Image (tube, rainbow, N blue to C red):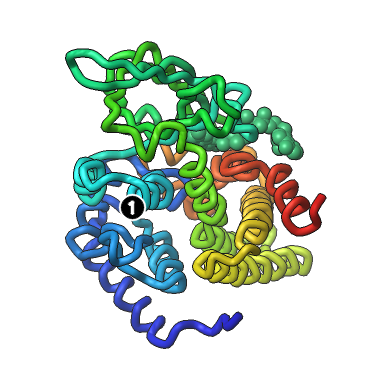
Amino acid sequence: MDFRPDPGLDAFREEVRQFLKHSLPADLRVTPTFSRSKPQAVARWQKVLHARGWGAPYWPKEHGGTGWTMQQILVFDEECVAAGAPTLDGMVHKLLGPVLNNFATPEQKAAHLPAFFNGERLWCQGFSEPGSGSDLASLRTRAELKHDDNGDHYIVNGQKIWTSHGHESDWIFLLVRTDASAKKQAGITFLLADMKTPGITVRPIRSIDDAHHLNETFFDNVRVPVANRIGEEGAGWAITKFLLNNEHATTADLPMLKHYLRQFDVLADTPLMGGGRLRDRPEFALKLARLQAEVTAVGMFVQRVAALEMAHHPMAQPMGSMLKVRATELQQRITEAHVEALGDHGAVAYPNPAEEGEANNESLPMHGLARGLANEMFFRRASTIYGGTSEVQRGIVARLLFGL
Ligand SMILES: Cc1cc2nc3c(=O)[nH]c(=O)nc-3n(C[C@H](O)[C@H](O)[C@H](O)COP(=O)(O)OP(=O)(O)OC[C@H]3O[C@@H](n4cnc5c(N)ncnc54)[C@H](O)[C@@H]3O)c2cc1C
């Protein structure tokens, strides 16, 4: 594999930088986090991108995307994070969008894509259920087909859990069981539902970083038109496998890994009370150098997996699983190292920037870095769980590579 940058990548980086400098409104700039930004910020930023023709930076041209190469996408994401641009709705950009592009009818695309490009409809993912996470195909939320004067529709009953951003999303894409007698994978159907539909209730789950990202979502006789079904009834599992493959690749989050390294650099240069800087201490310098090398290696790994995926190579899946494990464990180690480097400041529970806005960062210790790093470290505990746990990924590698 050739890891040399595309010719012209520097010019592209400069084009993105200039665009961000002139088009990213100052009041939208945030301290980058793993999490989707607040709905208003996402909507405003999505509109700006769309007006520039970059509304779907990850999609091929034939679906209204930019048609960028993987290296261009990585540069775009890296520059957006470095500039503090709002974090877009990954649910639709990276998960649902490719599903709609590949499996939806022209009517369904017309119903949903314009609102996506304008940032007017945010989405959440209703897959996991209590008892059905890793073993997703065991899900029990039922959907029964009904015909009446108001048209064909499903009546959905059941519960989803860990619905990220469910409380601030307009629509949900969900998996339901339409045939309890079939083999478990065969009885699953993929639906889209408006979160305002009567019978949908969202209850918050506060996570270890003391913020509200997660929810339980309950469906009580919820009426979903058949027109909102993606693919045939019972064909949901094939669509889900397509979507989950994209999810594994996106959880590597290389731009955030690079951002964490930059934050580590700032910490390394902060004057210490007793004199000197952390960077001058050999054990710290060694840790920093190791993390830098590992982020570079993950960067190459991301490109390798992307190339395998584009070639539909059979190694794409096990390598994608390896990448997910490697990158998410690195996310955890860097954010732990941040908190260690903060010393006493790392032990203070500053307000969570995801909830409290960006005010007064500079008046806080360590250039405001103390605020947010501990929250990020706590939430990254989850990165080896969501998108398929590390144990499950290792199982995939063992099965596909070693036939175990
Ligand atoms: C922060 C966060 C955000 C999330 N967001 C969403 C969302 O938006 N929408 C959504 O639908 N879901 C979401 N999830 C759910 C996520 O996909 C599941 O948590 C994940 O798939 C694991 O399922 P589980 O929690 O039921 O754990 P379980 O599957 O019950 O696993 C429990 C333990 O058993 C291990 N285990 C299970 N099966 C195997 C196996 N075959 N081999 C070896 N070990 C195994 C696991 O590794 C784990 O350690 C989110 C989760 C988190 C933590």
Residue 350 at least partly seen? no
Which residue is labeled 1 in the image?
101
Q: Is residue 210 positioned above or below 15 on the image?
A: above
Q: Is residue 17 positioned above or below 136 on the image?
A: below
User: In the image, 221: left or right of 350?
Assistant: left
Q: 315 or 282: nearer the eye?
A: 315
Q: 234 or 283: nearer the eye?
A: 234
| Residue at 26%, 39% in the rendered image | 121
| Residue at 29%, 28% in the rendered image | 226
Q: Could you say where residue 152 lies in the image, as x and y percent from the top left?
A: 26, 22
Q: Could you say where residue 181 lies in the image, as x and y percent from the top left?
A: 56, 20
Query: Considering the image in quadrants, where does the N terminus appear?
Result: bottom right
Q: Could you say where residue 284 lies in the image, as x and y percent from the top left?
A: 73, 63
Q: Could you say where residue 278 lies in the image, as x and y percent from the top left?
A: 67, 63
Q: Is residue 65 positioned above or below 174 on the image?
A: below
User: In the image, 274: left or right of 264?
Assistant: right
Residue 196 at least partly seen? yes
Looking at the rendered structure, the kind of residue marked 1 is: Asn
| Residue at 64%, 35% in the rendered image | 134
Q: Is residue 331 positioned above or below 206 on the image?
A: below
Crowd class of label 1 (few under 14; some 14 to 19; many from 20; radius 10 Å): some
User: In the image, 211: left or right of 85?
Assistant: right
Q: What element carries label 1?
A: helix
Q: 191 or 294: nearer the eye?
A: 191
Which quarter holds ligand 1? top right
**Numbered marks: total:** 1
Disc 1 under 8 Å from ligand 1? The reply is no
| Residue at 38%, 52% in the rendered image | 98
